[in-house]
Amino acid sequence: MLKGKERATPPPGHSFLGGTLANSVGESPVIMLYPLLLAKTVVQASRRSNSANNSSQYISIRSSLLGIYTAGGFFALYRGLGAQLFKGVVRQGTAMMVKQRIEQLVVQAYLKQRALRRVQYKG
């Protein structure tokens, strides 16, 4: 999509956009599995709370899913998905932007070092 100099060294905004686009495509498994991730978090939280209270009552992922569904219906299984997707998009976009900038700095340092060696070798 980029041409010329932008293709070799895309501006940070383009890197961020590319990272967010890639993340959006990769998030479909997260959307499908989100209820299981939510249930796992509920189970882990209940275990922490039970261990703090010295209780031995543990819930399963299945009972957690059933409880979430019973309490709030189908959409409750996807509570917090928007925030999770937003966090992933911002994280991936920022990571791509930082990676691209570090890559540029490394290449520039290499080229400067190479130019210095040529000058020293000629001299």
Image (tube, rainbow, N blue to C red):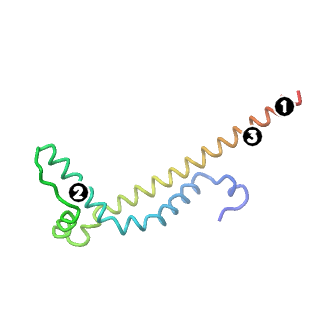
Pick the front one: 112 or 16:
112
Q: Name the amino acid, label 2.
A: Val
User: Please, what secondary structure does the residue beneath circle 2 have?
Assistant: helix
Q: Where is residue 76 in the image (x, y as percent from the top left)?
A: 24, 67
Pick the front one: 17 or 113:
113
Q: Distance between the residues labelled 2 and 1?
A: 64 Å
What residue is rendered at 12% in x and 50% in y? 56
Mark 1 or mark 3, which has the lower sequence index? Answer: 3
What residue is rendered at 89% in x and 30% in y? 122
The residue singled out by tag 2 in the image is 42
Q: Where is residue 4 in the image (x, y as percent from the top left)?
A: 73, 59
Mark 2 or mark 1, which has the lower sequence index? Answer: 2
In the shown orientation, is residue 54 left or right of residue 78? left
Q: Which mark is residue 119?
A: 1
- Above or below residue 58? Residue 120 is above
Query: Neighbour class for label 3 at 10 Å: few (<14), some, many (≥20)?
Result: few
Q: Please, which residue is most extreme toward the right here?
A: 122
User: Please, what secondary structure does the residue beneath circle 3 have?
Assistant: helix
In the shown orientation, is residue 123 left or right of residue 34? right
Query: Neighbour class for label 1 at 10 Å: few (<14), some, many (≥20)?
Result: few
In the shown orientation, is residue 51 left or right of residue 2? left
Q: Name the amino acid, label 3.
A: Leu
The residue singled out by tag 3 in the image is 111
Q: Name the amino acid, label 1.
A: Val
